[in-house]
Image (tube, grey):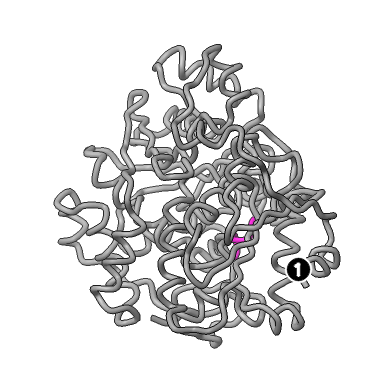
Amino acid sequence: MKLYSTNNRNLEVDLKEAVLKSLASDKGLYMPSILPKLDDKFIKNLNQFSLQEIAFHICSTLFQDSIAPNDLMSIINKSMTFPAPVVEIAPNISTLELFHGPSLAFKDFGARFMAQLMSYFNRGEKKEITILVATSGDTGGAVASGFFNTPGIEVIILYPSGKVSEIQELQLTTLGNNITTCEIDGTFDDCQSIVKSCFLDPELNKTYNLSSANSINIARLIPQSFYYFEAFKQKVTNKDLVVCVPSGNFGNLTAGLMASKMGLPIKHFIAATNVNKVVPDYLESGKYEPIDSISTISNAMDVGNPSNFTRIKELYPGLDEMKSMISGAWYTDDQVKQTIKEVYDTYDYILDPHGAIGFLACADHLRKHDNEYIFLETAHPCKFLDTVESCVNKQIPLPSAIDSLKGKEMQKQKLPNTFDAFKEWLL
């Protein structure tokens, strides 16, 4: 398998280099040089395959001979250990629940697969990999869980001070061992900027074997494509299927678009955001104008300059072409709170703030189009207790994986939001 840089199609590397280096030498993101079409027979018979078998077929087709079949199956079986059920909520609107992994967020799929893939590629190497990851909440918890005690890999997580939930912070800061956490006095965009600067710094790259577990790494996106096939398999309908993706850094949507390019018959995607609406604005005006991120109750989507929009433009270079496949939608905190309450009162289903945005976008689109809708429920509502409990006026029981974190000591390094300060601490 070959992958190219989004800044230079002639700059190609193999899968191992793309996974271990994360970012191309020219600052571009890696994209598969070829997205092969899966055979029609496989698509038509998805209901005959388990999630693990679907993942193996996709990877075998995409990776070609990069990984031996037995090793690939082992990577998948070790990482894909939890389900992704489709649950019907309202007429023509269902959700794909992606919070059944250990950190209770969709990023478990990508983080655990990436951990196994990196460990495989780093076998026999004397120098360990140092993974830098910026998080607005759920990425860090999934990465911490996925890479915990993985041989040959240390992880350093950066998160914005005061902008993650209490449970998210406990997931980030209580593991220890090969997981180190930095609380940055700034926004998620500041954390992401620091991480990107590290990859471009010669001194750090000489000292450390750096890689990333953010969605700038293609190893995060490939496994996220698996559950789009899993959703299509479960949702039997005679209508066209539209999938709504609550979006922050837009890696999740990119994975869905890649699945579509590989032959999955999804008619349309909705990119749903909070007031950090850079991409919906682009789809309306044709102007891409990054902003300083704005804090909201759907904090995993508080991204003012989404990294993966570059990849989406690779898949759909023209605005009209992109608009034919993607619609934009955005909502305020008040709308989100009202939706959480109404969906619970009407359908007895508890949404998290990100899923509420997905439901809203589906409901709005359904009023104009007679389709079947699935939105991605990306995190368990218990991760946003204060917001959700105040909306549904009910106490949400904590899963045992979360309840066991309470009372544990948080281990974290507090740092200002500058690259120089982080570099000095790292060295």
- Quadrant containing the N terminus is bottom left
Residue 397: horizontal and vertical position, in percent? 47, 22
Question: x and y percent of residue 366 in the render?
Answer: 42, 31
Judge whether 130 appears above or below 140 on screen: below
Residue 35: x and y in percent read 38, 71
Compared with residue 306, is residue 342 higher up or lower down, i.e. above or below? Answer: above
In this rendering, the count of numbered labels is 1
The residue tagged 1 is 426
The secondary structure making up most of the magenta span is loop
Q: Residue at x 58, y 30 (%)?
A: 384
Q: Amino acid at mark 1?
A: Leu
| Residue lying furthest bottom | 10
For the point 30% across and 70% down, the residue is 72
Place residue 110 in its image quadrant: bottom left
Disc 1 crowd rating (10 Å Cα; few below 14, some 14-19, many 20+) is few
At a point 63% along the width and 50% down the height, the residue shown is 279
Nearer to the camera, 317 or 180? 180
Position of residue 88 relative to residue 155, above or below, is above
Tell me which segment is drawn in magenta: 306-310
Residue under the image location 51 percent in, 31 percent down:
403
Q: Label 1: state its secondary structure.
A: helix
Which residue occupies the foreground of this view, 424 or 24? 424
